[in-house]
Amino acid sequence: MDRFETELDALKQRLMVMASCAETAVRRALQALWERDDGLALQVKESDRVIDRLEIEIDDLGIQQLAKAPLAGDLRLVTVATKIAHDLERVGDEAAKIARRAADLSREPAIPIQLDVPAMASLALDMLETALAAFRHCDPALARRVLPRDKEVDLFNTQVHRLLAQFMAEHPDTIKRCLHWMVVSRSLERIADHATNIAEDVVYLCEAQNIRHTGAKLVPAIESPSR
């Protein structure tokens, strides 16, 4: 392995460390939300700083490698790695938002309404894990499996917001708590969007095909979540 390949491997390794940190941040934020754990929510804030530093490191490594005029395949890898790092940094931001709302909600009584947030969270997290596994194994078929699921998360988000809006209108004393849950739902929807971006980048990396905004995603239809 020559020096450039060693540097590319180092870039990929740093990206996978960042991916692990981002996944862990989301899991901890959700655990803090489900268990009403203020202390765990604070840990997510600390991990967000680590994720921010890793993005800077990956950007610096990418710039150094681009300056060496890599071949087309290597150029795609460097470009995709920096783009994925940006999406992971945003995932970390969304995890921090969820954690902040979890801390606020832990100090308030629970609202008596059944929401599909756990199912939505499970789906968004699975999309993220699948997209990152597709990158790790350079598997565009696996990446394409992520793409149609984004619409399902969007439907969950719409449903949650509609139920919360109706509940707030009927119970004005719950407005603050309902707004916290709306932010959580929106953050989960954004995490799914970032997972989708990563999956699209994997297809570009492996197939040299940019499928963003092209309608060329070629994915099977999905069923809408129950309402």
Image (spheres, helix red, strand yellow):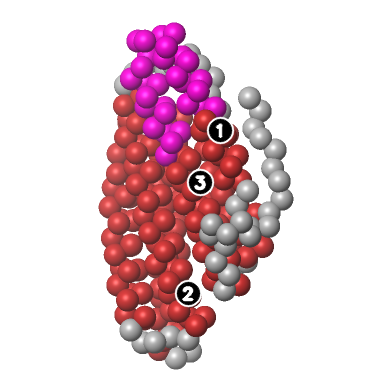
Cβ atoms at labels 1 and 3 below 8 Å apart: no
Q: Position of residue 17 (x, y in %)?
A: 42, 62
Q: Which residue is mark 2?
A: 77
Q: Nearer the viewer, residue 177 or 75?
A: 75
Q: Position of residue 14 (x, y in %)?
A: 40, 68
Which residues, given as a range, are shown in magenta?
Answer: 159-187
Q: Residue at x 39, y 43 (%)?
A: 95
Q: Position of residue 173 (x, y in %)?
A: 35, 10
Distance of label 2 from label 3 (alpha carbons): 22 Å
Distance of label 1 from label 3 (alpha carbons): 11 Å
Main secondary structure found in the magenta portion: helix
Mark 3: amino acid: Ala
Give the number of callouts: 3
Residue 106, image quadrant: top left
Residue 223 seen in render = yes
Earlier along the polypeptide chain: callout 1 or callout 2? Answer: 2
Cβ atoms at labels 2 and 3 below 8 Å apart: no
Distance of label 1 from label 2 (alpha carbons): 33 Å
Q: Residues within 10 Å of mark 1 (few under 14, many from 20)?
A: many
Most extreme residue toward the bottom is 2
Mark 2: amino acid: Leu
Q: Is residue 44 magenta?
A: no
**Rendered view: 169 above or below 149:** above
Image side of residue 135 versus residue 181, left or right: right
- Label 2's element? helix
Q: Residue at x 39, y 32 (%)?
A: 183
- Label 1's element? helix
Q: Position of residue 12 (x, y in %)?
A: 45, 71
Mark 1: amino acid: Phe
- The disc at residue 156 is 1
Q: Which residue is mark 3?
A: 192
Residue 32 seen in render = no
